[in-house]
Image (tube, rainbow, N blue to C red):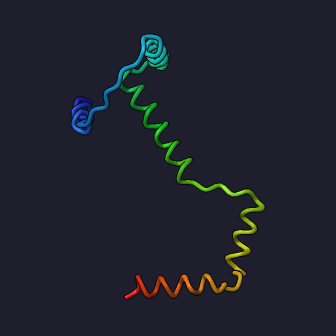
């Protein structure tokens, strides 16, 4: 178990520092006590969970059943290219494709 503690300390090279007001600190300390965890461990877990949730919310696209049906229908049966789209492809080819 001592080896794990050393490994954990070795992995935690970066620091985050911020100040909170007294009531907020007391609230967080109380929550950590209720879970019988050290304050640092409780905060690190809570911040990591919140960060993962935020990233997931921003990187995940959720479609309604109707939107999903429209999306897949357009993939299977794409509309004909408009003149404007054809010009855009030609311009892209001229500028980007060697």
Check the picture and name the quadrant holding the C terminus.
bottom left
Q: Nearer the viewer, residue 67 or 7?
A: 67
Percent x, y for residue 51?
Answer: 46, 40
Q: Position of residue 62 (x, y in %)?
A: 65, 55
Res 17 quadrant in image: top left
- Left or right of 91, for residue 78: right
> Residue 75, relative to residue 52: is it above or below?
below
The residue lying at 23 percent from left, 37 percent from top is 13
Q: Is residue 6 left or right of residue 36?
A: left
Residue furthest to the right: 66
The quarter of the displayed image where residue 2 is located: top left
- Foreground residue, 61 or 4? 61
Q: Quadrant of the N terminus?
A: top left
- Residue 28 lies, in percent from the top left, at 46, 18
Residue found 70% across the figure and 69% down from its top: 71
User: Is residue 62 shown left or right of residue 18?
Assistant: right
In this view, the residue in front, 1 or 22, is 22
Q: Nearer the viewer, residue 9 or 92?
A: 92
């Amino acid at each position: 178990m001592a080896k794990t503690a050393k490994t954990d300390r070795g992995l935690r090279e970066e620091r985050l520092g911020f100040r909170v007001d007294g009531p907020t600190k007391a609230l967080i300390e109380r929550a950590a006590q209720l879970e019988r965890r050290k304050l640092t461990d409780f905060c690190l877990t809570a911040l990591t969970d919140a960060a993962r949730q935020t990233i997931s919310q921003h990187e995940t696209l959720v479609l309604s059943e109707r939107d999903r049906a429209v999306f897949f229908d357009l993939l299977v049966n794409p509309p004909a290219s408009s003149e404007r789209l054809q010009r855009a492809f030609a311009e892209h080819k001229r500028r980007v494709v060697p």
